[in-house]
């Protein structure tokens, strides 16, 4: 059964269809959540939040955008919510508490976390943009659709990110 | 050394998420299924449930542009689908707590559905998420971190927790019972959501309240409540706030943690109440502190929202721009109050702000509309004065009122003496630019820089320009430099980048020091402040800042304020500072507005020709029964202030026009007054004075004098037809005044419509060299459609 039929049935209240939908998309959700935070347990929390949110808001999916775009957007919004909640509880779980768990090579994981942190500091929408384009391989137009901005905005953001991170790297190298 | 710019891209694209740990997928699925069941149940039970917050948060653009129609349609279909079920179930829902005996009736006084039309704009619909906003504390709850995951059928114990959503201004309590069904109650605004907490004096009592509620709900294992690091905030947070002992962001060290919130949990880290958060606004200062930060974020999910907050959010939708509240001038009876006194106002920022709002398709908040500033935005061809010594000649024009049959409009127009370009005094200008992080928007710092470059074009080569910036710290970017070296100034301007918080006061001090060091005797010494609104550090209060500006004015350095951007524009402060600094406050929303203020009218912006200009009109009670001053509400003066030279008033720049309009109701020409005033006390020349509606007096000081001079002129009855030019200008200013009053609610404009305004303005545009009047007509059209929304 394809996505759309599943969604229609789930929207009509079919719990089995909804369960199948979650099964199908959990990996996507979890993957993006993990890339967002680079931390296994947090990623699971975000993914779970997103699944719950999916249950509550599936009725509002109106088949206008691709389901995956819509889903990305939902996960982005959950991740933002999560982060906002987390910011006040930094002591709860520092991302660095599980080094090595997160990537094939430890230094990769640490570098990724640094990149994520820098992206997070660039301002609203920047981290999301970078993740969608670079980590998830979306085109600028698709990313724009997910984030509700124009394609050119995405291109501009990518440009800004590139400049900012290049400066950051230069500084790190010289330091 | 060249560094690859794509290292981070590689890191991102190579980032491989590990497989979810065992059980994570199942937990998430089960949690989602439980939520799914809850949502379905809620849908069946009532159509009130509108879990708008569950939708992915719309982007900021969408919040502004809106997907409102879809939103409504969806609500309607939801409503339609469950309409019949609602009737039955609604009754059940209403009676349910009574039947079950579990709910104290005092706690909930009523239920109601809200039709879509009654909803607040969805753009700012407060997010309400059916899950606890905060992941539960680590170890214990890692396995089952989310309270709402346990909702519905999987509950061992009915969750007394309140799930929050909003409906209109009122909190909605969503409360699953043991069968997993959900009752939804809309709380009357005045009623606290949970009285058990309303009287709580401490977090412990809040916790006790929860336990109590739990017992009432039939929980057989009352779990000891545990306060985590947050605090339950009640819908009437203000009431709670006043109670001693409650931890609300009262301490200064908490000021940066405005979003203080509370979660009360039961044993084993299970959340019995969903997190409620409340952005507490302790007082204005806190809000102002927040204004320095980012634009207002949508509130976090999963929270009870207070009516006050909804108000705040509404305001946020309009931006946090601050305007002084004022009521429109009332109609006054001449017999009781024959004298009307006010200070002139040549500021135009209100018009620019209104224009900006309308261009965005929104009607401006009423307090943003100051009729006199709208009227005075336009340059009127009143006859101009001939010399610097008698810098204006009032023009009086009486016409029939287009707003009310039988009334008349009296125009008092002043056109200031226009200082010829070659005779212009030397200018010592210090630009004080706000480069705080909030200025980092295309319509703020970049526009300010472009505006300043425009301004350079209207200065003489020997004039000097210095630049001071302020952000986290204040600094001098450019020592006073002659405009001859224009490139140097332009380079300095273009090197500015925004960042940091705002230290406005310190910047002002530094700018004044610079201006003082370079003081030009007999010239114009002026600080030109460009900001998006905030001065929050340094001199403590607004009053202190105003006093400082006033003292500097006495030393000869004036201040003008240019406002940029929106979101936290503080109009009131800008006005007050400019007024105390004998300067103008202008709001620059576009480069063409900068062109108008800084080039076309630069001499008016820079050169003051008269200061403390006050107007007093005394009406003849024999001729006028009632009068109403249109606008100038914020500029009213006491009658005795008119002759008091110590009382500050507005200033008129070179070439400025000032127009005031009165609407009067004539009583006829019988001079039978016993009023002990001009027309009554001395009865002799009643014949002559019966031909006057009133008497206009204008008091002003020349820029370098401290004693005021007086110009006066009578308002004649039946003076014959007006000169064609004056008549046209009167028609246009009347149209603008009518429009402004419509935007303010139109209490006094009778049956006037936007179409009437368009019609009147179209016929009175004249040659309109800069296109401002044409733009006005377009603006009225926009207001028409904005109203239709």
Image (cartoon, coloured by chain):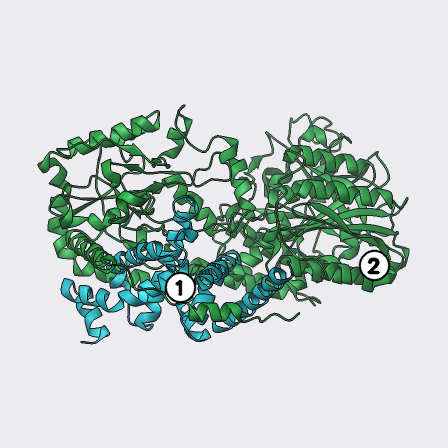
Chain colours: A cyan, B green
Q: Label 2: which residue?
A: B459
Question: Which of A25/B576 is in front?
Answer: A25
Residue found at the very far left of the displayed protein: B99
What chain does mark 2 sit on? B
In the figure, is residue B627 to the left or right of B8? right
Please give the chain letter of the residue carrying mark 1: A
Q: Nearer the viewer, residue A97 or B92?
A: A97
- Count of numbered badges drawn on the protein: 2
Q: Which mark is residue B686?
A: none
- The image shows residue B269, relative to residue B658, as above or below, that is above
Q: Is residue B43 left or right of residue B67?
A: left
Task: Locate residue B452, reporting x and y percent.
Answer: 74, 58
Are labels 1 and 2 on one chain? no
- Regarding mark 2 in the picture, which secondary structure is present there? loop
Position above or below: B783 against B665: below
Residue B706 appears at what percent x and percent y? Answer: 84, 34
Q: Position of residue B184 (x, y in %)?
A: 21, 45
State the residue at coordinates (22%, 55%): B27
Q: Which residue is mark 1?
A: A103
Residue A148 visible here: no
Position of the N terminus of chain B by quadrant: bottom right
Q: Nearer the observer, disc 1 or disc 2?
A: 1
* Cα separation between marks 1 and 2: 62 Å
User: Which quarter of the picture shows residue A50?
Assistant: bottom left
At x 35%, y 51%, the residue is: B127
- Neighbours of disc 2 within 10 Å: few (<14), some (14-19), many (20+): many
Task: Give the side of residue B675 with respect to residue B463, left or right.
Answer: left
Image location (x, y in percent) of residue B632: 62, 42
């Amino acid at each position: 059964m394809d996505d759309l039929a599943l969604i229609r049935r789930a929207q009509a209240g079919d719990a089995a269809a909804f369960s199948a939908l979650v099964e199908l998309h959990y990996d996507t959700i979890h993957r993006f959540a993990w890339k967002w935070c680079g931390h296994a347990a947090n990623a699971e929390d975000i993914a779970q939040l997103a699944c719950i949110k999916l249950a509550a808001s599936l009725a509002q999916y109106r088949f206008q955008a691709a389901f995956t775009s819509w889903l990305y957007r939902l996960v982005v919004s959950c991740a933002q919510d999560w982060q906002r909640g987390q910011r006040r509880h930094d002591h709860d779980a520092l991302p660095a508490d599980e080094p090595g768990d997160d990537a094939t090579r430890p230094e990769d994981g640490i570098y990724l976390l640094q990149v994520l942190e820098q992206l997070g500091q660039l301002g609203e929408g920047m981290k999301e943009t970078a993740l969608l384009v670079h980590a998830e391989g979306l085109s600028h137009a698709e990313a724009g659709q997910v984030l509700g901005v124009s394609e050119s905005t995405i291109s501009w953001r990518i440009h800004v990110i590139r400049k900012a991170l290049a400066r950051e790297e230069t500084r790190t190298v010289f330091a | 050394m060249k560094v690859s710019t794509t290292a981070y891209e590689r890191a991102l694209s190579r980032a491989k998420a590990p497989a979810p740990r065992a059980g994570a997928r199942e937990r998430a699925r089960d949690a989602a299924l439980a939520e799914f069941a809850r949502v379905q149940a809620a849908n069946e039970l009532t159509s009130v449930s509108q879990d708008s917050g569950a939708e992915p948060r719309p982007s900021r653009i969408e919040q502004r542009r809106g997907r409102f129609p879809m939103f409504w349609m969806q609500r309607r279909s939801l409503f339609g689908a469950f309409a019949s079920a609602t009737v039955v179930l609604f009754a059940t829902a209403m009676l349910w707590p009574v039947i079950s005996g579990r709910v104290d009736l005092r706690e909930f006084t009523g239920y109601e559905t809200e039709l879509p039309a009654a909803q607040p704009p969805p753009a700012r619909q407060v997010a309400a998420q059916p899950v606890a906003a905060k992941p539960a504390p680590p170890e214990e709850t890692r396995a089952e971190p989310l309270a709402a995951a346990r909702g519905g059928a999987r509950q061992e114990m009915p969750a007394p927790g309140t799930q929050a959503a909003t409906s209109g201004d009122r909190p909605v309590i969503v409360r699953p019972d043991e069968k997993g069904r959900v009752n939804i109650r809309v709380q009357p605004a005045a009623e606290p959501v949970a009285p058990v907490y309303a009287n709580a004096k401490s977090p412990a009592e809040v916790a006790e309240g929860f336990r109590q509620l739990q017992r009432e709900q039939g929980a057989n294992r009352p779990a000891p409540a545990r306060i985590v690091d947050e605090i339950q905030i009640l819908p009437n947070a203000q009431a709670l706030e006043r109670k001693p002992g409650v931890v609300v962001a009262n301490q200064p060290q908490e000021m940066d943690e405005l979003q203080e919130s509370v979660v009360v949990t039961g044993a084993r880290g299970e959340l019995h109440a969903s997190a409620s958060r409340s952005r507490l606004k302790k007082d204005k200062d806190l809000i102002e502190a927040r204004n320095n930060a980012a634009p207002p974020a949508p509130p976090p999910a999963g929270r009870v929202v207070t009516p006050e907050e909804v108000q705040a959010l509404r305001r946020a939708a309009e931006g946090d721009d601050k305007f002084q509240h004022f009521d429109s001038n009332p109609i006054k009876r001449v017999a009781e109050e024959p004298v009307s006194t006010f200070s002139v106002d040549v500021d135009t920022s209100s018009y620019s702000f209104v224009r900006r709002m309308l261009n965005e398709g929104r009607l401006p908040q009423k307090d943003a509309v100051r009729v006199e500033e709208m009227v005075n935005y336009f340059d009127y061809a009143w006859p101009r004065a001939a010399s610097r010594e008698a810098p204006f000649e009032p023009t009086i024009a009486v016409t029939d009122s287009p707003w009310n049959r039988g009334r008349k409009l009296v125009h008092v127009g002043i056109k200031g003496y226009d200082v010829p370009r070659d005779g212009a005094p030397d200018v010592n200008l210090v630009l004080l630019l706000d480069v705080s992080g909030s200025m980092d928007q295309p319509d703020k710092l970049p526009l300010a820089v472009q505006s300043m470059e425009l301004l350079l074009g209207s200065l003489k080569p020997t004039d000097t320009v210095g630049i001071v910036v302020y952000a986290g710290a204040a600094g001098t970017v450019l020592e006073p430099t002659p405009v001859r070296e224009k490139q140097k100034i332009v380079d300095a301007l273009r090197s500015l980048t925004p960042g940091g918080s705002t230290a406005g006061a310190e910047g002002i001090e530094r700018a004044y020091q610079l201006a003082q060091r370079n003081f030009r005797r007999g010239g114009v010494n002026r600080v030109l402040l460009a900001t998006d609104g905030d001065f929050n550090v340094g001199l403590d209060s607004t009053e202190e800042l105003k006093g400082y500006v006033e003292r500097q004015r006495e030393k000869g350095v004036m201040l003008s304020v240019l406002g940029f951007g929106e979101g936290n524009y503080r109009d009131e402060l800008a006005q007050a500072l400019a007024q105390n600094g004998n300067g103008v406050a202008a709001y620059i929303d576009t480069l063409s507005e900068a062109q108008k203020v800084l080039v076309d009218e630069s001499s008016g912006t820079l050169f003051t020709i008269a200061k403390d200009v006050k107007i007093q009109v005394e009406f003849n009670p024999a001729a006028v029964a009632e009068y109403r001053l249109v606008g100038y509400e914020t500029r009213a003066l006491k009658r005795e202030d008119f002759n008091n030279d110590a009382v500050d008033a507005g200033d008129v720049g070179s070439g400025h026009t000032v127009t005031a309009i009165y609407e009067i109701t004539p009583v006829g020409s019988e001079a039978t007054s016993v009023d002990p005033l001009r027309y009554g006390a001395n009865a002799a020349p009643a014949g002559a004075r019966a031909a006057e509606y009133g008497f206009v007096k204008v008091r002003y000081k020349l820029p370098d004098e401290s004693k005021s001079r007086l110009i006066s002129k009578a308002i004649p009855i039946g003076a014959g037809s007006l000169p064609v030019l004056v008549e046209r200008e009167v028609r246009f200013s009347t149209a603008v005044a009518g429009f402004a009053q419509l935007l303010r609610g139109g209490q006094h404009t009778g049956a006037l419509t936007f179409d009437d305004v368009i019609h009147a303005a179209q016929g009175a545009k004249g040659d309109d060299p800069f296109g401002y009047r044409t733009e006005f007509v377009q603006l009225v059209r926009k207001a028409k459609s904005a109203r239709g929304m």
